[in-house]
Amino acid sequence: MAGYQARRTGLVAAGAALGLVALSVGGVFARLVAGARDLVTPPRPWRSGRLLAIGDGEVTLTRTAETALPGRYGMWTDDDRGYAKVGRVIRTDARTVTRELLAIEAEPWVPGLVVRMGAAYYRSPAELGVPVEEVTIRTPLGPAPAWCVPAASPTEEWAILVHGRDAQRWETIRAVPMLRAAGLTSLIVSYRNDPGAPKAPDGKYHLGDREWYDVEAAIAYALASGATRITLMGWSMGGGTVLQTLRRSPLAGTVHRVILDSAAIEWRAIIRRILDDRAVPAFLHPVYRALLTTSRGAVLVGLDEPIDLDRLDSIAGAAELSVPMLVLHSSADSVVPIEVARALAAARPDLVELQVFEGAGHVRLWNSDEARYEAAIGDWLARTQRA
């Protein structure tokens, strides 16, 4: 009897242990699914910190990696109702950071609010004091809004500006003065899943694998409007989308140069960075990728078809590129590792000029060093005018 009880106790303990393991494995898998779904789900507001005090030309925030970054930024309240512009860091300590308050453009702003600081500084090209036209681009899914900022003088050279993931077209406005000074008309586009643009059939990002069709539609619009030479400029996922356009669009021959800011050149490296930041063990990384790249995984994540990471690898596909490129990237980019920019430059030294910024956040190169950013682009545009 005692032996039976001992065996029974052992079996119960083993069963409980297996149950805990199953629950643990199930919990880990659920977190991987949630993480993969998060990667492809259109904009979700992020949080940078909390507002502690405001007034007298200053704003004090809880100190985080984002609220302490140098430069000037747009700042939203968590519900998107409030918008302000903040500038340089005035003082900081272990817990707080006080920045210059440049403008309050939309209320409310009261202590206690959760805020987010974004790389976008302008909300409309009209803030630049230049003419702006609201236009509509006919994408494969339907009409998408865009801004057109004409050059100061008639021109056949247009630039198409493509924002990144979890952003909107206003992210790209800061490039307009440089492009306009170089004599280009700027077309600031939206794409599927953006506010005012058509939703994708599955409502998800495809990391550039489908979004490039909307950039192609923007090229067609520019050509129909009199453009003969196109410059493409993309930020983050928008940069990856630009590269897909170059490699896959029949209209790629009209593109004569490209500018990439913090571009998603190769997604495996980005995914690896995401998983490492979340302390996901390396042996589980293939599971996460399979959620994006296999039919069964796509169903769990909400994609209507898997994403082809091989097709999105523009380092492996570098031989397909044929136009001059200015690649701007931060050594401290926490989203897209600097190594992917270096790899693209090494793969195509004949085409790629790499400018590395030190210490800037992801897509925050302009914010961190406005003068250098504008000089780098202005100089490169002048040198490649007739490329």
Image (cartoon, rainbow, N blue to C red):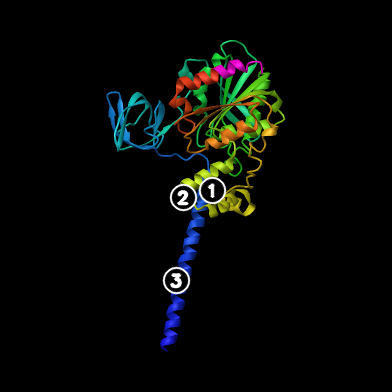
Q: Quadrant of the N terminus?
A: bottom left
**Could you tell me the amino acid type at mark 2?**
Ala
Q: Amino acid at mark 1?
A: Ala
On screen, residue 55 versus residue 230, left or right, reads left
Q: Residue 18: where, in percent of width, then height?
A: 48, 69
In space, the residues marked 3 and 1 are separated at their CA atoms by 30 Å
- Measured from the top left, where is residue 270 in percent x and y? 54, 41
Q: x, y (%) of residue 99?
A: 33, 28
User: What residue range appears in magenta?
Assistant: 379-387
Q: Is 233 included in the stretch rendered in magenta?
A: no
The disc placed on residue 279 is 2
Q: Depth check: 106 or 159 in front?
A: 159
Quadrant into which the C terminus falls? top right
Tag 1 residue: 36
Residue bearing the label numbered 3: 16
From the image, state whether disc 2 or disc 3 is nearer to you.
2
Q: Quadrant of residue 339?
A: top right
Q: What's the residue at 57%, 54% (across, down)?
A: 287
The answer to whether residue 313 is above or below residue 131 is below
- Report the amino acid beneath label 3: Ala
Task: Please tell me which residue lies in front, 1 or 187.
Answer: 1
